[in-house]
Amino acid sequence: MLGLTLVLSLPAAQAMAGDLLSVYRQAKQNDPVFRSAFHEYQASKEIIRQADADMSPSVNLDLVRADTRQRIISSDNTVFASGSSTFDNDNVTLSIVQPIFNWSIFKRYEQAQAKTDSAAARFDMARQDLVLRVAELYIDVLASQDVLTFSMAEQAAVERQLELVTARKDAGKARLTDLLDVKARFASVEASRIEAEYANDDALQALDESSGGNSGILETLGDNVTLSKPYPADVDAWVRLALASNPALKSKQHELEVARKEREIQRAGHYPTLDFEARKNRRDTDGSLFGGGSNVDTREYMIKLHVPIYAAGKVKSRVREANQLYLKVKQEIEAEKRAISRQVRSAYFGVISAMSKVNALGKSVEAQSLTLESKREGYRAGLYTNLAVLDAERDLYLAKKEYTQARYDYLLNSLRLKHAAGVLTESDLVFINQRLQ
């Protein structure tokens, strides 16, 4: 099952300035979302160390310096029936405590391991998110550049048509309505071109926001994109792979283990604890009410048994709370499974649909090109109106936009399929990168 692959997995290629891989590697160093996930993962590694420390001996040194003032109020000893004294006390205590039996500490160690595993899965998810996000942003730029290019080309074509109609109008071969139609269309395509410029600039800014700098002049997608179905061509196989490999689901499953351990930790509130404690104390007293000072050295070795008897229902309440949180995570896992299944199916059929659209729209572009040329010739011969030519130009550039977008959709849905399956890696960008020029 883990051997399922898309045709996107190809050998690594050298990245050049402005290509997809170089932008991605720049984003790995600068993308704040990914860097935040990285630091969260690094912090999670400390959880096990902290849990391990709870099971190890703890050593403490306490130093106390006290200024003592005493006054006798009453005494049965007639010698010391009255009087007062002021003196210093120095108290030094070294203690060592080693847990022998503490169920909650042992379970917290197991819980810490589950928390670390969950964090590792979340980091893997962040890494795959970055791969997909950079690819989407990069392709958004390419798509916006294509739209701008087509808009400029359409504007130039309408401008040529405007010059032609103006000349024919001056020669008395065209009507005023023809000239007004082409002027209105020219104003419309100019507005579309301006809108495309703004959209392209926004797409570039979004890419630079992730990469943390100027991405430079981007390479564009060439014509050598081979369309292939996902392998294997079985959507259910991809769903099974996703349910086994998706890092978001893995993280939730580890969270379920964390919640299970939390139930056991709270139940440990009913259990006794047993500790070994060794203590050494030295007390230096400069004086007292009843005589001179003293130096006392005390050593104690203790086995301490703590038995909880009554806590007003607090422990049971905490157990019920932990159980409800455990059931909550179970429902979240079920929701995650359903969402992942839907994402896989959507991406899988998105690849199939995009392949069909690329083939169909490629033929549509060829047909629209022939139609436009035919209507231009027909207009010169008086067979078609000027509006028919303008509509043919609009339809041609619309078909070109849809054709290029379908190619981008094919690439993105292929990546989204592997992302939903949880097996997307940097090498999967190579397929796109090798087809940039």
Image (spheres, rainbow, N blue to C red):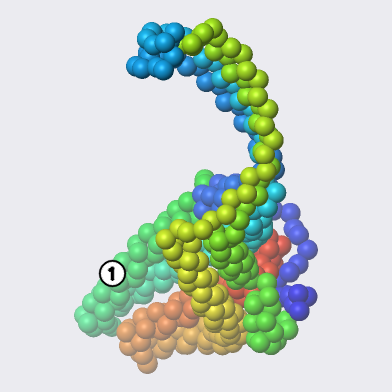
Q: Residue at x 52, y 45 (%)?
A: 213
Q: Is residue 100 visible?
A: yes
In front of the other: 213 or 268:
268
| Count of numbered circles on the image | 1
Q: Is residue 333 left or right of residue 156?
A: right
User: Residue reaching furthest left?
Assistant: 176
Q: Position of residue 269 (x, y in %)?
A: 54, 59
Q: Residue at x 30, y 75 (%)?
A: 185
**Image quadrant of residue 166?**
bottom left
Question: Is 61 situated above or below 377?
Answer: above
Q: Position of residue 130 (x, y in %)?
A: 58, 59
Q: Residue at x 37, y 83 (%)?
A: 391
The residue singled out by tag 1 in the image is: 187
Q: Which image quarter holds the C terminus?
A: bottom right
In front of the other: 318 or 117:
318
Q: Position of residue 20 (x, y in %)?
A: 62, 58
In front of the other: 235 or 290:
290
**Amino acid type, callout 1:** Ala
Q: Residue at x 45, y 58 (%)?
A: 311
Q: Which image quarter holds the N terminus?
A: bottom right
Label 1 sits on a secondary structure element that is: helix
Q: Position of residue 217 (x, y in %)?
A: 55, 52
Question: Is 287 situated above or below 143?
Answer: above
- Label 1 crowd bin: few (<14), some (14–19), many (20+), radius 10 Å: some
Question: Is 194 situated above or below 283?
Answer: below
